[in-house]
Image (tube, helix red, strand yellow):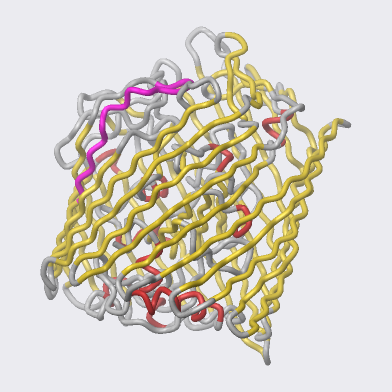
Amino acid sequence: NKGNSMSGLLQRSAIAAALNIAAFATPSAFADDLLDAKAEESTQRSGDKVSAKSNQDPDALLNEAPWETEAVRVTARGTANDWPSALATDVVTYAEAVAAPSDFQDLITRVAGVGATGQNGIFETFSIRGSGANGILILVGGMPITAQRRAGVPVAFVEPILLGDINVTRGPAVAHFGAGALGGAISIEPRWFDAPFVQGGYATSGDESSLSAGMGSEAFSVAVARHQAGDSEAPDGTPLNTSFERQSASLQYRTTFGDFNLDALLLPSRTENIGKSNSRYPVRDTTYPEDSHTLGRLRLRHDNGFEATVHAHDQYLGTWNRRPGQADTFAAVSSTDIGSTVQQTFEFGNWTSNIGIEYLGRRDVDGYEASGSVLNRNYSLKNGTEDSWSLFALADWRATSELSFEFGGRTTAIDQEQRGASSDDSDHALTAGAIWSPTPGSRWTLNLASGYRFATLEERFFTGVTPQGEIVGNPDLGSEHSEGIDLGYALHSGNWGGEVHVWRTDVDDLIQLVDINPDVNGYVNVGKAKLHGGEIAVNWSATSALSLRSSVAVVRGTDNTGLQLYGIPPVTADLEARYRAAKLDASARYSHRWKFDRPGFEEEERNSVDVVDADLRYHFTPSFNLQFYVRNLFDEKYYATSDELSTFAPERSIGINLGWTLH
C-alpha cells in the first residue's frame, strides 16, 4: 500500500518510492527488483531528473501496471546520498491516504510502529517505535528541522497537499540520516507540479476548508495552499480548540549545464491562531498566535557523483496562555538555522560508497516568557548559538546476486553557547546490514545500528512557562545513545505479499522529564531504557479490482526502573480495502486500538477503540476528479492520545475535494 504500507522493502522493488501509483499491488519480479533497486538509484544520484511518471497527477497513474519496473530515483533520503536498504522503511504519500488526513501527523501515525503522542490538535507529535520528542530526526527537502518545543518537532507547518514522497525509517538511523535519528527518521520531499493543478475541499468538523493550486514544467514548479479550520466538537459535544489558519507555498527550480545539475527550493509557511486542544479547554486556553517557517535550499551535483548543498531555516513560534484569575502569560522561541553538506559518491564494480562532511549551525536562538503583557519579557535564551560538524561514510557491496551488504558510520562534534555558558559534546554511530534473497519470492534483512542525539539548547538553557506548566533547563545534560537490531522477512507468492519485522533498541542516558514541583518539570538523564516489539503486514490482491491490506504493530518500552516510557503507543491493527473500477475508486480503513493500560510519565490509561474512515473517488475525466470521504464514520468517542491532558478526538467529519489537473 503506497499510502500506508508496512515497509519500503516491497515498495522499492515496485518503483513506488518515486511514483504515486496504485496501492495494494504485489511485485512480479520481487527479488531481482529488490536487489537492483540500490544499483538503479545510484546510477541516477548525479542528477535530479525524476521520470515523467513521477510528475503526473496520481489519479492518472491508476490505470498503469503498478509493478512495472524501471530505473527510478528515490528522492526522500537523509543528508547522505544513500538509500538504507537493510532498515525498516516505508515510503508514503498523501495522495493515496484514505479519507484525506487533516494534517501531517494524522498521515504519519497510520504507519505501523508510529504512534501519536502529546495533546491532540495539529501540534500533536508522534513517536517511532517508542522513540519520540527529539529522539526522531525530521528532514524537509533534506534540511534537518530543529526542535522548538519540549514535545519535539511538530510538522504542523507542512501542508500535506504540497508533499511528495515521505520516507519513514524505523530504528536507529544516524549514519544514514544525521545526528538526532536516535530511534528513527522522517524525510519529506516537496511535490513537483509540472502542469496546472487546482484543488478545493471542505469538511464539516470545524468547518475545515482548503484551497491549493500549482503549475510548472520540467524546469520549475510553483504551488500555493491555504488551509483553515474553526473549533470543533467531540461526539458528545465537548468543545475542542482546533482552529488554525495556514498559508504555505512551494517554489522549485532545476536546470542542467554541462555535467552539472542545479536545483533550488523555497518553502515558506505561516500558521496563525493555532488552538491547543486539551482537557483544560475552555477553562484554560492555550493558543499559538504564530508559527512561521521559511526554508531554502540550493544543491549542485556533478555526473561524477559530487554533491554540494547549502540550506537555511528561519522559524518563530509564539504561545499565549490564559487562566482564570491569573495574568495572561506568553512565550516565544525563534532561531535561524544554516547548514551545508559536501559529499562524493564512488562506484567500483559491485561496491558503491559515499563519504561526506555536514555542518549545521543555529544562530539567534531566543526564548522568552512574559506575564501580563508580551512586552514584559524575561529571556531564558538570548542569542544562543550551536555549531555541529559531522563526518560520514557509507558503503554498499553486492556480493552475489542473492546477497548484499551495507556498512556505514558517522561522527559528530557539537558546541553550544548561551550568555557566556557553553557546552560541547561528541558522539559516533555505526550501522551494518545484510540483504539476502534465497528465492525469487523471499527476502531477509538484518540491521545492526547505533545512534545518538544531543540535548537541545532549549533543554539545556530554557526556563519558562509552557502550555503544560513551567519547565526548567538543565545545562549538565549529556547525549543519548541507542543500539538497535532489526530482523525482517518479506515474502511474495501469487497474489499474496507480506512482511514482518522484530526489533529491539536499547537507549543509554535517556533524557526524560521529571517532576520538580507541582506544575514544574525538569530534564534529567535517567540511565537506560529498553524498547522492543514487532510489526507485520499482509497484502492480498483478491481480484484485479479488489485489494486488501492488514498490519499490526506492538511496541514495549521501560526505563531502568521498570517504569513505562512516555510515548509508547497502544497495540494497534489496521485493515484497508480498496476497490478500483474504470472511473470509481472506493476504499475504507478500519483501525483497532487495544486498551492502553501501561501509562508512562504524564499519561493515563485509555479504553480500546475502533475507528473507521471511508473514501470514494470518481474520475469524471482524466483531468477532473471528485473525492468524497468520511473520517470517524461511526462517530466514536475516544481520547486522541494517552497524554494526561489529551481530550477527545473530533466528531465524525464529512468532506469533499474537487481537483483538476491539465493533462
Residue 171 in the image, given as x and y percentages of width and height: 50, 49
Q: Nearer the viewer, residue 483 or 241?
A: 483
Residue farthest to the bottom?
258
Residue 126 visible in image? no
Rendering coords of residue 306 (x, y %): 70, 78
Q: What stretch is highlighted in magenta?
A: 589-603
| Residue 293 in view of the camera | yes
Q: Of 31 and 37, which appears nearest the observer? A: 31
Depth check: give the residue in front, 292 or 615: 615
Q: Report the quarter where the C terminus lies.
A: bottom left
Please state if 616 lies on the left or on the right of 222 as rendered.
left
Q: Residue at x 54, y 46 (%)?
A: 484
| Residue 457 horizontal/vertical position (percent) | 72, 36
Say whether residue 597 is magenta.
Answer: yes
Magenta stretch secondary structure, dominant: loop
**Measuring 16% from the left and 73% from the top, which residue is drawn there?**
620
Q: Nearer the viewer, residue 402 or 113?
A: 402
Quadrant location of the N terminus in the rendered image: bottom left
Q: Residue at x 59, y 27 (%)?
A: 512
111 lies left or right of 153: left
x, y percent for residue 553: 33, 43
Image-quadrant location for residue 547: bottom left
What residue is shown at x 24% (from left), y 74% (from top)?
62
Question: Does 540 appear above or below 274?
Answer: below
Give the answer, above or below, for where 196 lies relative to 576: below
Q: Magenta stretch containing residue 262, yes or no?
A: no
Q: How many labels does the image show?
A: 0
